[in-house]
Every structure is written in C-alpha cells, then in structure tokens.
Image (cartoon, rainbow, N blue to C red):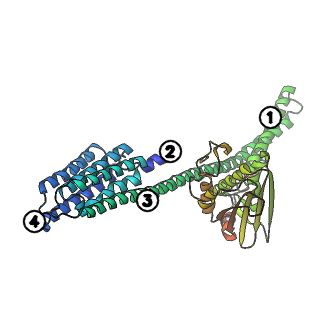
C-alpha cells in the first residue's frame, strides 16, 4: 500500500463510531432537558426541545439502517454530519437562553472531532460555522429559563466574554487536536512503511537461505550424474563413436558448470540458510561499503578494538538501516566518507562521517521523526525506493537499527573549518552478540545429518 493509502485510511471515520458518539450526545441532551424541566422545575419549551433532539435521533436511525457498521465516511460526509450537529446544538441553545446557557461550550465538541479526523480546511469551515452561530445566539435567542419570573438577563459584557471563550477555545482546541492527531497519523504511517521495508528485506534474505538449501539438495543428484558420466566415459572410451565421446565431454563440462553455480549458492551461507548466518563486525562493514565503491567517493574504512572482534547474527532490518545511512553519506559527501568500527569488551561502535554540508538544524532538532527529509529532490538517486523523497528514509533506518538494541545519534563535524555529518551507532556488546550466541548454541545442540556415501561429494 502506498503512503497516500495510509493517509486516507487513517483519516476516514467509521460510521459506527460516529453513530455511537451521536447517541451519547442525544442521551446527554435528553437528560439535561428532562432534568431542567422536571428536576429543577425550570419552564422550558419542552416539546420544541425534544423535537430538535428527535431530528438527530431520526438521522442516526436512518444512517444505521442505510449503511453497514463497518462503512467509512468520506471527508465530505463526515463534515456534513458534524455541521448538522453544530446546527442542532445551536437550535437547542436558541430555545434555552443562547450563550447564557452554560452548555454553549459544547460548540467545541464537533470542531474537536473534525480536527482529529478531517483535513484542516474542513475543520476551519466547521469552526467558522460554530463561531457564526455563536455570534447569532449572542444577539438572538429565547430567554434563559429561571426560577422566579421565568427570565434571567445577564449583562452583555458577560455574554461577550462567553463568545470570546468559545472563539478562543474553538481555535486553540482545533489547532492543538489537529497537530497531535496529525503527528500520531504520521507516526503510524511511517511505522507501517517500516514494516513493509522490513518484510521485504526479510523476504530477500530468506530467498538467499532457500537458494542455499536448494543447492544443498541438488548436490546429491548432481554428484550421481557426475559418477555415471565418468563411468560411461571410461566404458565407451574405445568403442564409442567420436560424436558420442564429444557428447559425454560436453555433459561433463555442463556438470562442472552446475557444480560451480551450486558452490556459489552454497557460499551464500555457511549454515545452510542465509538468514541464520553470523558475521563479524568488519565483514558487516565490508558488506555495507562494497556496493558504494563504484560511486566515485573515497571510502576510508577502519576496524580496531580491544579483545576479539564481535560477531552478530545477520539481521536484514539492521543491514537495510545501516545501508541507508551509508548511502546517504555517499550521496552527500564531496569527496570522502569515513566508516570506523570500534569495540571493547563492553561496547561496540560504528561511526559514519562524510565531508558534505552536514545535517540541517531541522533534522538535528527532529531526529528520528517521520517525514523529516535529509535530501533535496534533485539529490535522491533512488526515487522509486520506499520512503525516498518523503522523509521516511532516516526514520526507517533509525527504527530498524534501534530495534536491535542500538543507540543512534546524529551530529555535525565539530572541527573548525570542516563540515560534514556524523552518525554514531553503539550497542552494548552482549546485546550485539546476543543472537549470534543463541544461534551457535542451537547449532551445537542440533543433531547432525547422516553422511550420504552413494555419490561423490561436490
């Protein structure tokens, strides 16, 4: 699914949720009218109030009958329903005192719902509708029901204060709710994109394992073919025609060629499944660097540390994340990228530096947030890749790397007169080697297969 598809699905409201919220509002309105009329004894236009409430109930019933509960409302449909709720609330307030009624603050509710689920322009339209109706109610309304003579007139200055509170509340809550909801949507969409990338990388890694397993299984029949070919060549060496001997020689050459291909497939992994391979830190760095050597940028690689070199289990997500960072460094570097791997008995570090312009202040302030791009459109070499140009590359890389227990920090070169970006990734050594150790234990405890002796080894 594309990113635009994530956006649409995240915004659209389920009709069932909308109807349930409206039933809750209808119940509250009914309770308020009944309580004021019969509990407090206030003289309300009871019939007119319940007629207004009934229109909302009839609309809810019509929606429930017409559409299934799983139906998702379009932006326009949701905005129209929220506009109806604002008008219905304004009608109730007109009958019960206008802005003098303390329930006038409920104008904020539809705007708040719109801000969390609808585009900003529709929220703005609903906010303007609410403010317009509030302005009208400040000037035209039925008297507020009261105990003594059935009338209570509040000063116009107080009414103006309520109107101002509704105006400011609508603006503030609308903007605040939209901002929070938008950040939540962006994070959910970016995480979904990350899951797609991770699934793709795992699938490609598993293909390596399947290829190695297929090579292992094909080794036995290919060995048998080689034995039979040698035997036929020996038996027919003096009696066969030249054409038959040429065919046998060609068959042996093709078998040798197949053996070479299978050897390459088998070398994808030393444990019969590529996605279970363990690699040393220096080998992992070399895998990251090798695809970038033809890009015309000097790659300065160094590996050093105290104690034995750490090893880790091959992790497609980490490989993708690190590859993305190296790709960015090469893309922005002017002439040189430094990749330094260091380790001690307690920690493992990987530092990637380039001599480009460095990270912008916005990237450093919002490091790790989705949709913060480090590229300009003209510098993206892979516009068709997942997240390219959308500001998802760094977020996906950071998410995948930190899932392995690493800490990733971004900074710029601090030396005077020098520029460039610096990405530092560090692991606690026991976390870096955790999966490799568990894999070695699993290999040692696994029963060894019986050796087949019916054919010569490949």
181 on left or right of 390: left
Label 3 packing within 10 angstroms: few (<14), some (14-19), many (20+): some
Cβ–Cβ below 8 Å for labels 3 and 4?
A: no
Residue 115: image location, x then y, percent = 40, 54
User: Alpha-carbon distance for marks 3 and 4?
Assistant: 43 Å
Which quadrant of the figure has residue 271?
Answer: bottom right
Taking depth in this image into account, of 65 and 6 the one nearest to the observer is 6
Q: Residues within 10 Å of mark 2 (few under 14, many from 20)?
A: few
Percent x, y of residue 204: 64, 48
What residue is rendered at 30% in x and 63% in y?
A: 161
Question: Which of the two labelled residues, at mark 1 and mark 4, occupies the earlier sequence position?
Answer: 4
Quadrant in the picture for residue 42? bottom left
State the separation of the CA atoms marked 2 and 3: 23 Å
Q: CA distance from mark 1 to mark 4?
A: 112 Å
Instruction: Using the rendered image of the protein, determine whether residue 454 is visible from the camera's viewpoint.
Output: no
Residue receiving disc 4: 149
Is mark 1 in CB contact (under 8 Å) with mark 4? no
Position of 191 with respect to 66 (left or right) is right
Q: Nearer the viewer, mark 2 or mark 3?
A: 3
Q: Secondary structure at mark 3?
A: helix
Q: Which residue is mark 3?
A: 176
- The residue indicated by pointer 2 is 4
Is 201 displayed left or right of 342 in the figure? left
Q: Which residue carries the number 1 mark?
A: 251
> Mark 2 and 1 residues: CB-CB less than 8 Å, in contact?
no
Please report whichever mark, 2 or 4, sits nearer to the chain's N-terminal start: 2
**In this view, 390 is above or below 187:** above
Q: At x 36% / y 60%, what residue is drawn?
A: 169
**Earlier sequence position, callout 3 versus callout 4:** 4
């Amino acid at each position: 699914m594309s990113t635009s598809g994530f956006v649409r699905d995240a915004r659209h409201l389920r009709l069932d949720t909308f109807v349930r919220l409206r039933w809750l509002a209808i119940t509250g309105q009914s309770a308020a009218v009944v309580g004021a009329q019969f509990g407090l004894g206030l003289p309300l236009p009871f019939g007119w109030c319940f007629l207004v409430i009934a229109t909302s109930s009839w609309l809810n019933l019509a929606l429930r009958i017409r559409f299934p509960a799983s139906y998702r409302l379009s932006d326009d449909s949701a905005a129209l329903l929220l506009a109806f709720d604002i008008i219905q609330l304004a009608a109730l307030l007109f009958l019960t005192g206008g802005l003098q009624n303390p329930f006038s603050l409920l104008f904020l509710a539809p705007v708040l719902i719109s801000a969390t689920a609808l585009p900003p322009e529709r929220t703005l339209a609903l906010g303007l509708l609410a403010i317009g109706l509030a302005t009208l109610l400040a000037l035209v309304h039925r008297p507020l029901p009261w105990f003594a003579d059935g009338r209570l007139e509040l000063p116009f200055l107080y009414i103006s204060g309520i109107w101002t509170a509704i105006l400011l509340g609508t603006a503030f809550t609308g903007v605040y709710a939209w901002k929070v909801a938008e950040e939540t949507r962006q994070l959910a969409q970016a995480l979904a994109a990350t899951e797609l990338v991770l699934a793709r990388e795992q699938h490609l890694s598993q293909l390596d394992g399947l290829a190695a397993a297929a090579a292992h299984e094909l080794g036995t029949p290919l060995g048998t073919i080689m034995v039979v070919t040698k035997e036929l060549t020996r038996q027919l060496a003096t009696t066969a025609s030249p054409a038959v001997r040429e065919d046998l020689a060609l068959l042996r050459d093709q078998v040798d060629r197949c053996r070479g291909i299978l050897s390459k497939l088998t070398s994808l992994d030393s444990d019969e499944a590529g996605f279970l391979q363990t690699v040393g830190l220096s080998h992992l760095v070399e895998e990251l660097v090798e695809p970038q050597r033809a890009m015309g940028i000097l790659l300065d690689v160094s590996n050093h540390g105290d104690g034995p070199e750490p090893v880790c289990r091959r992790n497609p997500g980490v490989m993708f994340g690190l590859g993305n960072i190296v790709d960015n460094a090469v893309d922005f570097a002017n002439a040189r990228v430094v990749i330094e791997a260091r380790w001690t008995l307690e920690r493992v570090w990987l530092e990637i530096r380039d001599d480009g312009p460095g990270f912008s202040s916005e990237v450093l302030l919002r490091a790790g947030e989705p949709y913060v791009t480090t590229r300009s459109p003209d510098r993206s070499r892979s516009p068709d890749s997942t997240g390219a140009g959308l500001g998802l590359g760094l977020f996906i890389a950071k998410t995948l790397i930190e899932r392995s227990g690493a800490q990733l920090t971004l900074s710029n070169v601090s030396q005077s007169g020098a520029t460039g970006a610096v990405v530092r990734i560090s692991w606690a050594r026991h976390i870096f080697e955790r999966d490799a150790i568990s894999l070695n234990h699993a290999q040692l405890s696994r029963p060894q297969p019986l050796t087949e002796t019916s054919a010569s080894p490949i």
